[in-house]
Image (spheres, rainbow, N blue to C red):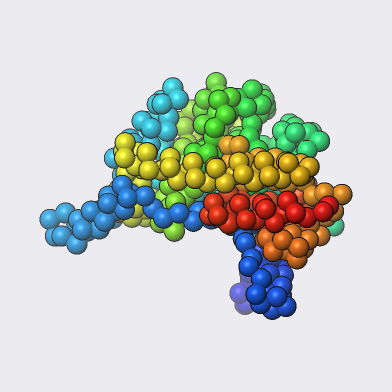
Amino acid sequence: MVVKINENYLKLKSSYLFVEVARREAEFIKENPDADIIKMGIGDVTKPLVPAVVEAFSKAVDEMGDADTFMGYGPEQGYEFLAKAIIENDYNKYGIDLDTSEVFISDGAKCDTGNIQEIFGIDNKIAVTDPVYTVYVDTNVMAGRTGEMQDDGMYEGLTYIKCNAENGFVPELPSEPVDIIYLCYPNNPTGTTLSRDQLKVFVDYAKENKALILFDAAYEVFISEDDVPHSIYEIEGAKEVAIEFKSFSKTAGFTGTRCAYTVVPKELVGYTEDGEEVQINPLWNRRQTTKFNGASYPVQRAAEATYSAEGQKQIKEVVDYYMANAKIIRESLSDIGLEVYGGVSSPYIWVKTPNDMDSWAFFDLLLNEANVIGTPGSGFGPSGEGYLRLTAFNTLENTKEAMDRISKLEF
Ligand SMILES: *Cc1c(COP(=O)(O)O)cnc(C)c1O
């Protein structure tokens, strides 16, 4: 007898993207120790938690230190107080009704979007947009829903829906039948959005084909366009076909604090081999109660505080700060003739490389000539080739300086 590993893990390509970015940066610094490098590849928020959140967080920590108010294990699904605040602020506001039993609070949308696939059968056909947030792909590889990665950078057995400038970054319906579709809007990495009508096409497809949409709305707070939905449930009938993921990470700077939630409506069903209808909500409930013991009480109090009047105002200031950076990036690059996408309802700006340069060549050019670091689009999937991602998470000063430097370059 020997220990056998899950060989699906061997199919995974090492996450070469950020390692390679760091390697090229280190090499550049070694040769140019005095260079003032500006990092525009940052995929993490940089502003601290707002005061209203810190206050609630710290009050809840004090409660934990007092015998009279100490809390042990909480509900695996999260506290009722937070689920209610979520429904009132993130759903009722948009005319969507939910029950607290449909909201599952967790410690992250990365875990939830990664774990959700395990309540679905192994032979479901999966579709992702390309470029993509790699969590959706890698977790399905680990589970054994794909073959090996092919020479074109795509895993065998997975359906990739191309999103590029040619189709205006609007994914087309999959050309082969699929069962589960991952959508992330506003999109990471492209920063582009779908309008209600464009999203409705997918909801209708799912209804017609008894398929399911896994909708990642982690960047919802950045939406500034009126026709962009804040939740997939704004689309009629979506409760029958979609699970939605949201996170306090980008919304309120919780990347290091950890709180998110997943909505699994009661209307949502899947099917057994025999074609019998099964409600999905109890499956996720069973998964979470078995494998998860809830997000911490202070963290959930901190998340609740993001919905107070003070919290909302303070969070908006932070979001406005990032979005002012995004606007500067978009306008500066457009002014020098570069094609830019995103950055209107998203902190990400997706830049088309000039002169058909490949992603890494443009990365090197910006690093060497402007000492600015972006993220090569090719790292997010084959359709990301020929693009570079910049983010609005640096300071206003650095963002302006980076744009000044890039504006002086000749392409
Ligand atoms: C940042 C991000 C998340 C949030 O993940 P957390 O685990 O909640 O921090 C989810 N989806 C996408 C696409 C993201 O970029």
72 lies left or right of 142: left
Name the side, left or right, on which 245 lies relative to 176.
left
- Nearest the viewer among 291 and 188 is 188
Q: Residue at x 31, y 53 (%)?
A: 54
Image coordinates of residue 64 in percent, x first then y, are 22, 58
Whether residue 177 appears in this view of the structure is: no
Instruction: Give the residue furthest to the right.
Output: 355
Pick the front one: 58 or 145: 58
- Asked if residue 321 is positioned above or below residue 196 in the image, the reply reads below
Horizontal and vertical percent position of residue 36: 63, 67
Q: Quadrant of residue 164?
A: top right
Residue 12, image x and y in percent?
A: 70, 62
Q: Quadrant of residue 213?
A: top right
In the rendered view of the protein, which quadrant contains the N terminus? bottom right
Name the residue rendered at 51%, 28% in the picture.
233
Q: Is residue 24 visible?
A: yes
Q: Is residue 32 above or below residue 98?
A: below
Work out whether residue 224 or residue 92 is closer to the camera in this orientation and state it: 224
Residue that extends furthest to the left in the rendered view of this protein: 68
The residue under the point 52% across, 46% down is 322
* Left-right relation of 6 to 158: left
Please give the name of the residue rendered at 41% of the width and 50% of the height, measured from the top-left corner: 259
